Image: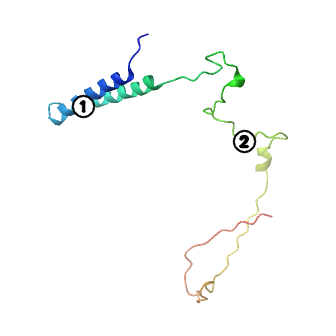
Amino acid sequence: MASLDKTSVREEVSRLKADFDRLNTEGEISTEIQAVMNGLFMVVELILAIFLERSTKKNNKNSSIPTSQTEKDESALGHPGSNGKGKSENKDQARNTRVKETVTVSQVLTCNVCAEDLSNVACIDHERRVSLR
């Protein structure tokens, strides 16, 4: 496998991009070619970022290092919920409960800050309070 010098490849891509930008500012490139070349430069930069920057860490799957000496893989999603021992929660049983809701409307007659009379003022908003018993 041939080895590439990362800096020379990046310098060559930068030089080509600068030449393209110069021709573009001089008006010698059509809009269709501008779109195609900008897309190609984006793909080339993506390829450079992937292949010239990748370094694979050694672990138990790609080397002879035992599993006890490799770092834990934190990229995988964990299992939701707790890892507790004991009886598991029955969600069907929780749905079989009765919720008793009572509504009480309280009139506000005076302001609790300045004690002004509010009996002739229309209600603007309401608030809900939950009481767990």
Residue 44 percent across, percent down from the top left: 35, 25
Query: In this rendering, does residue 52 appear at all?
Result: yes
Q: Residue at x 40, y 24 (%)?
A: 47
The residue at the far top in this view is 1
Rendering coords of residue 23 (x, y %): 17, 31
Q: Residue at x 22, y 33 (%)?
A: 21
Judging depth in this view, the residue of 99 and 11 nearest the camera is 11
- Front-most of 107 and 113? 113
Q: Quadrant of residue 111?
A: bottom right
| Residue of label 2 | 81
Q: Residue furthest right?
A: 86
What element does badge 2 sit on?
A: loop
At mark 1, the secondary structure is: helix
Q: Is residue 88 left or right of residue 114?
A: right
Q: Is residue 50 left or right of residue 125?
A: left
What residue is rendered at 69% in x and 36% in y? Answer: 79
Q: Quadrant of residue 72?
A: top right
Residue type, mark 2 in image: Gly
Left or right: 2 as drawn, with respect to 25: right
Which residue position is annotated with label 1? 18
Distance from the alpha carbon under mark 1 to that under mark 2 = 53 Å
Tell me: residue 35, above or below residue 60: below
Query: Is the residue marked by circle 2 packed among few (<14), some (14-19), or many (20+) residues within 10 Å?
Result: few
Q: Say which quadrant the C terminus sits in.
A: bottom right
Judge whether 96 appears above or below 13 on screen.
Answer: below
Residue 82: image tag: none
Q: Closer to the camera: disc 1 or disc 2?
A: 1
Q: Amino acid at mark 1?
A: Ala
